[in-house]
Image (tube, coloured by chain):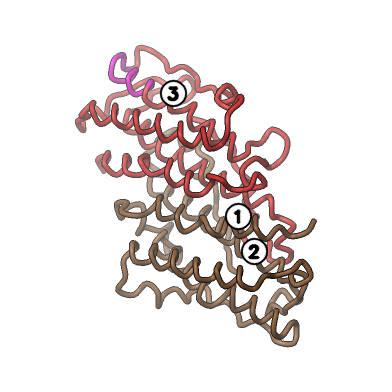
Chain colours: A red, B brown
């Protein structure tokens, strides 16, 4: 089925406000704690989403349109958000995520992509040949991967507090799944 | 550690706005599709959350405070939302969820629960003796279970569209975990 770009963008446009409504001004138990060593807090996850906006999605889109498969994407630095996080607050990160996402969607809209553009190909350093359609779909599902992760990280903080109900709460059964893009 | 009721309520207060920001006016591909037979769409999940507000959390809270372990909770009807869904729109459900959640939190606040109240016990039909603290913690983590589920159900709709990136997207590896409360 042809890629419905309006549908993909409608989700991308909502993620910053959804995370804002969920996380802004929440107690730090929910936003600053993680699932253990080498795992991310919701605060860090928002930083990671900002880093993707700055370095991944639109720069790869431009690369596909300008160079096709002749140039390989830069590998995405999954720890690149560390620079975003220094000396900042969750509230600043939420503002910044909304700003950079909005800018990127404005740029994407201005490209006026045609169906044939969405079938153009680029080269991923590990996955090989990929289409622009797959890249833009992945951008949206990457948001959902991290919403899924945030809900799991937050739930983890109350793992003991729910007592015997833990067996009924699906999010507490989720072992987590590594993700990158 | 003692239950921080303010912390629990701060999460409960945000869920309706977070789901509203994520789902309102989204194309139906994201909101009305499920993961296959006998699974729920985001639309149905919001109905389920409303049903919990009407029949589960505060009625069990009252039962613990009034009757302790002498009366067993009514089993929660996991399909009870079907009545909520007839002839209604997602936008109406989001409004209704915000309304009933806000009423329930106002009622909870008005109880002025003391730490010793949170240790009072009730009787769950399957889990046996549970505390009010565990019930209120479960209310919050039940929200997160369904946010986790909604992100997974939405991601499922683009499972094929992301192409080779699917292996990197954690939410697409999540097999789902049954939940009830």
Number of numbered discs on residues: 3
Q: Chain of mark 3?
A: A
Alpha-carbon neighbours of circle 3 within 10 Å: few (<14), some, or many (≥20)?
Answer: some
Alpha-carbon neighbours of circle 1 within 10 Å: few (<14), some, or many (≥20)?
Answer: many
**Lateral position of residue A59 relative to residue B144, left or right:** left
Query: Residue B50, position in %: x, y?
Result: 47, 69
Query: Residue A131, position in %: x, y?
Result: 33, 28
The foreground one among B162 and B81 is B81
Q: Residue at x 48, y 44 (%)?
A: A19
Tell me the magenta residue range. A59-68
B155 magenta-colored: no
- Residue that label 1 marks: A171
First in sequence: mark 3 or mark 1? 3
- Among the 4 quarters of the image, the one containing residue A85: top right
Label 3 and label 1 in one chain: yes
Query: Residue B33, position in %: x, y?
Result: 36, 57
Q: Which label number is shown at residue A54?
A: 3
3D distance between C-alphas at marks 3 and 1 = 30 Å
Secondary structure at numbered mark 3: helix
**Lateral position of residue A58 relative to residue A74, left or right:** left
- Residue that label 2 marks: B138
Up the image or down, A77 lies above or below B76; here it is: above
Q: Closer to the observer: label 3 or label 1?
A: 3
Alpha-carbon neighbours of circle 2 within 10 Å: few (<14), some, or many (≥20)?
Answer: many
**Lateral position of residue A124 relative to residue B146, left or right:** left
Secondary structure at numbered mark 1: helix
């Amino acid at each position: 089925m042809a890629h419905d770009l309006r549908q993909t963008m409608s989700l991308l446009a909502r993620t910053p406000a959804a995370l804002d409504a969920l996380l802004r001004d929440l107690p730090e138990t929910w936003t600053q704690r993680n699932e253990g060593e080498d795992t991310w807090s919701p605060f860090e996850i928002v930083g990671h989403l900002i880093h993707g906006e700055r370095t991944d999605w639109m720069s790869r889109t431009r690369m596909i349109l300008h160079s096709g498969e002749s140039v390989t994407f830069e590998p995405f630095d999954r720890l690149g958000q560390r620079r975003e996080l220094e000396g900042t607050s969750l509230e600043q990160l939420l503002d910044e995520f909304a700003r950079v996402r909005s800018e990127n969607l404005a740029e994407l809209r201005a490209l006026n992509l045609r169906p044939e553009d969405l079938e153009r190909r680029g080269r991923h350093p590990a996955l090989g040949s990929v289409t622009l359609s797959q890249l833009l779909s992945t951008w949206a599902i990457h948001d959902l991967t991290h919403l899924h992760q945030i809900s799991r990280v937050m739930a983890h903080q109350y793992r003991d507090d729910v007592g015997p109900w833990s067996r009924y709460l699906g999010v507490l059964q989720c072992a987590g799944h590594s993700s990158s893009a």
